[in-house]
């Protein structure tokens, strides 16, 4: 495995920590900033908005720069936002700093995907992108539980100090290990968006937003589901989250290998059908602890099983605007996260038990399957752009 891909994975680990750890430390942050937990939840939304704003903005501003320089600049923004957050005591400033932290997220995945694609051996592009994305899954497996433990032992601020130092280490590794890569051909401002005239990127974006959003309908409420429906104690939830993180790691690597063998479109379609199965089984049988855990592992593996194939597809179908296309995957992912979490919570708001978000999620994934099947039939069957 090339050391340069490991350096890229250090960056996605950093982004994974910044994005997901806030969900587990929210009560500590709320207490420190003297606000309610729902108010502190704006810190999560601010990061997601930063991702959606930063992905196209950074790509447009930096599209003429060498690829390795763009990566270094993005990491500087990341570590700046996290270090500012470590010393923040005001909610409003915290929202600003979280917004700053989210700005490089989508653009890093976009540029990193192009770099990984160039570094990959012929026919192994999806596997190379999966290696880059593996940092995100390792963050869920190790980083988030460790961050939660540090919040209990020391302070939630220590996590953001760690993020800042990790960002500095990532900067050094990227500087030393990523070779010089010339800028992409300059297609002009309009050229960055010309690929959107085709239906292909819209179908890929829809399959990302609704397919992954369906998982977040359910996963956003995984703790109360496992506690109140499956019957696990609060002390056992941490171990379950580690198991979920491990499943994400397995799914990420498996998705990359399957896509290299069977094409990305077919892999996404198969994984999304598995998502629907897992969510429906969860809805009907979540009261059985063993089944609930097994389906949790299946669904979280599926969530990252489609990550690298989706990243590669938008990269392939965005000629002339490759950085923008690859970054749009993260915009779609975060929109799906936000919409899925909201819609998944609606049944609970109206008094239904916590297995109902899985049913809503299954309906979301059906839309994703329709988008994927349409894409495969119209484009991948004929080998267009692949």
Image (tube, rainbow, N blue to C red):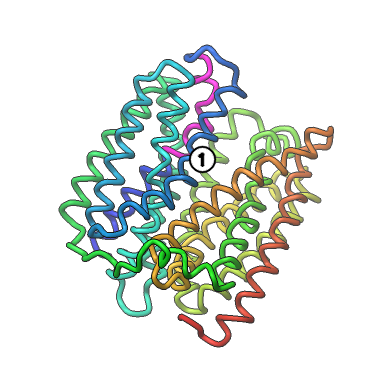
Residue under the point 45% across and 71% down = 257
Q: Nearer the viewer, residue 10 or 246?
A: 10
Q: Is residue 2 above or below residue 109?
A: below
Decide whether the magenta segment is chiefly helix, strand or loop: helix
Q: Position of residue 4 (x, y in %)?
A: 24, 59
| Residue at the outermost right position | 351
Magenta segment includes 122: no
Secondary structure beneath disc 1?
Answer: helix
Indicate left or right for 256 with 276 as reference: left
Residue under the point 33% across and 48% down = 11
Q: Position of residue 103 (x, y in %)?
A: 40, 42
Rendered-image quadrant of the N terminus: bottom left
Mark 1 sits on what residue? 49
Q: Position of residue 109 (x, y in %)?
A: 39, 55
Q: Which residues are magenta?
A: 18-31
Q: Is residue 2 above or below residue 61?
A: below
């Amino acid at each position: 495995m090339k050391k340069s891909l490991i350096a890229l994975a250090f960056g996605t680990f950093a982004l994974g920590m910044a994005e997901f750890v806030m969900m587990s430390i929210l009560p500590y942050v709320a207490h420190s900033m003297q606000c309610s937990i729902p108010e502190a939840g704006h810190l999560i939304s601010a990061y997601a908005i930063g991702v959606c704003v930063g992905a196209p903005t950074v790509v447009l501003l930096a599209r003429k720069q060498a690829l390795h320089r763009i990566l270094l600049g993005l990491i500087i923004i990341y570590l700046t936002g996290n270090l500012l957050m470590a010393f923040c005591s005001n909610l409003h400033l915290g929202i600003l700093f979280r917004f700053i932290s989210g700005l490089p997220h989508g653009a890093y995945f976009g540029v990193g995907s192009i770099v990984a694609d160039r570094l990959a051996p012929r026919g192994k592009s999806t596997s190379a992108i999966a290696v880059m994305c593996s940092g995100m899954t390792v963050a869920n497996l190790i980083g988030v539980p460790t961050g939660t433990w540090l919040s209990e032992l020391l302070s939630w601020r220590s996590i953001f100090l760690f993020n800042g130092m990790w960002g500095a280490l990532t900067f050094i590794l990227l500087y030393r290990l990523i070779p010089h890569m010339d800028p992409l051909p300059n297609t002009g401002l309009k050229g960055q968006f010309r690929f959107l005239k085709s239906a292909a990127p819209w179908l890929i974006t829809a399959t990302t937003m609704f397919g992954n959003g369906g998982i977040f309908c359910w996963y956003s409420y995984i703790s109360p589901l496992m506690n109140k429906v499956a019957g696990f104690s609060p002390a056992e939830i941490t171990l379950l989250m580690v198991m979920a993180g491990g499943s994400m790691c397995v799914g990420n690597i498996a998705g990359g290998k399957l896509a290299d063998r069977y094409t990305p479109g077919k892999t996404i379609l198969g994984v999304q059908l598995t998502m629907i199965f897992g969510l429906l089984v969860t809805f009907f049988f979540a009261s059985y602890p063993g089944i609930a855990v097994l389906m949790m592992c299946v669904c979280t593996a599926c969530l990252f099983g489609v990550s690298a194939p989706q990243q590669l597809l938008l990269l392939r179908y965005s000629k002339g605007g490759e950085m923008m296309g690859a970054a749009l995957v993260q915009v779609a992912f975060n929109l799906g996260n936000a919409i899925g979490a909201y819609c998944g919570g609606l049944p609970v708001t109206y008094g239904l038990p916590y297995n109902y978000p899985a049913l809503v999620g299954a309906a979301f994934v059906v839309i994703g399957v329709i988008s994927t099947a349409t894409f495969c039939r119209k484009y991948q069957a004929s080998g267009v752009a692949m």
